Amino acid sequence: MPSFFSQADERLAGIIENWKETAVSEVDDIGGWRGVIDDPPESQSDEVADRVVRGLGWNAPCDFYTDTAYLIGELTAHFPKLDPQPLYDICRAVSNWHADHNASRIPNQLVLLSTLELAMVVLASVMTDILSRRIPNKPEAVTDGASVDCLVTLQQAAAMVNRSKRSLERAVPNMPMPRVQGAGGKPSEWEWSELRPWLETEYGRPLPERFPADRFRPV
């Protein structure tokens, strides 16, 4: 697959993908917490319910705060036309929530989801710029009828359509079958080429033929 123009581009792309996945998960967790403490409570996943009932809570996201600071710095220095405020607002909400798990003192869920979508638009613009500079490799011959495809988790797929993992969990019965069935704490994985058309139809947005990650394998 094409190479990144520089190590800086490769690092920035990796941090963007990590930030998106973590941000979607954190906003989803906050929504789950709010739903459980509602009166009457909303129906939640077993994972959310277990965390609340057992008082386990959630751990603060690893590297999320430093990644946010890095991305805001990059936006300010190299993308002055893009507004970093949505990233800051999401980070502040996540930080405040992890301070005491009091979801009532951060923006309501609709505002939070709207802010997350704005952040995704900003980061998508940065990724477009990065990908425009990639250096194409010479085509490699594929033997024995093998092709190259990518395995993606539900969390990664959700980030591509700006939805929460929980939203896609509800849709799993209507989705293509996963190529790798999750077990023992490991997530299920779908072939991107099989899942992409379903996501485009279901959520009405075009998606890249190649998943923007480096986890490719022969099939």
Image: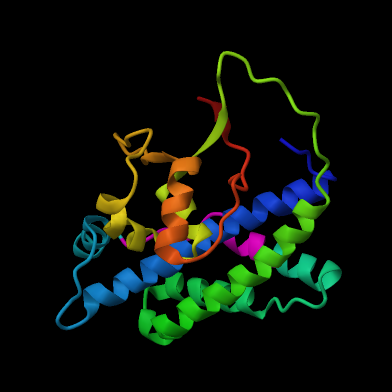
Q: Residue at left 80%, top 73%? A: 76
Measured as percent of width and height from the top left, residue 134 is found at: 80, 46
Q: Residue at left 35%, top 58%? A: 168
On the picture, is 105 further left or further right than 170? right
Q: Is residue 180 visible?
A: yes
Q: Which residues are magenta?
A: 57-69
Measured as percent of width and height from the top left, residue 8 is found at: 81, 50
Q: Residue at left 23%, top 77%? A: 37
Q: Is residue 179 above or below residue 170?
A: above
Q: Quadrant of residue 104?
A: bottom left
Measured as percent of width and height from the top left, residue 124 is found at: 66, 64
Name the image colouring.
Answer: rainbow
Measured as percent of width and height from the top left, residue 213 is found at: 61, 44
Give the quarter of the figure containing the N terminus: top right
Q: Is residue 129 above or below residue 135?
A: below
Q: Is residue 2 above or below residue 127?
A: above
**Any magenta on residue 82?**
no
Q: Is residue 106 visible?
A: no
Q: How many marks?
A: 0
Between 200 and 88, the one lying in front of the other is 200
Q: Quadrant of residue 78?
A: bottom right
Q: Residue at left 60%, top 52%? A: 208
Residue sticking out furthest to the top: 144
On the picture, is 212 further left or further right than 54? right
Q: Quadrant of residue 51?
A: bottom left
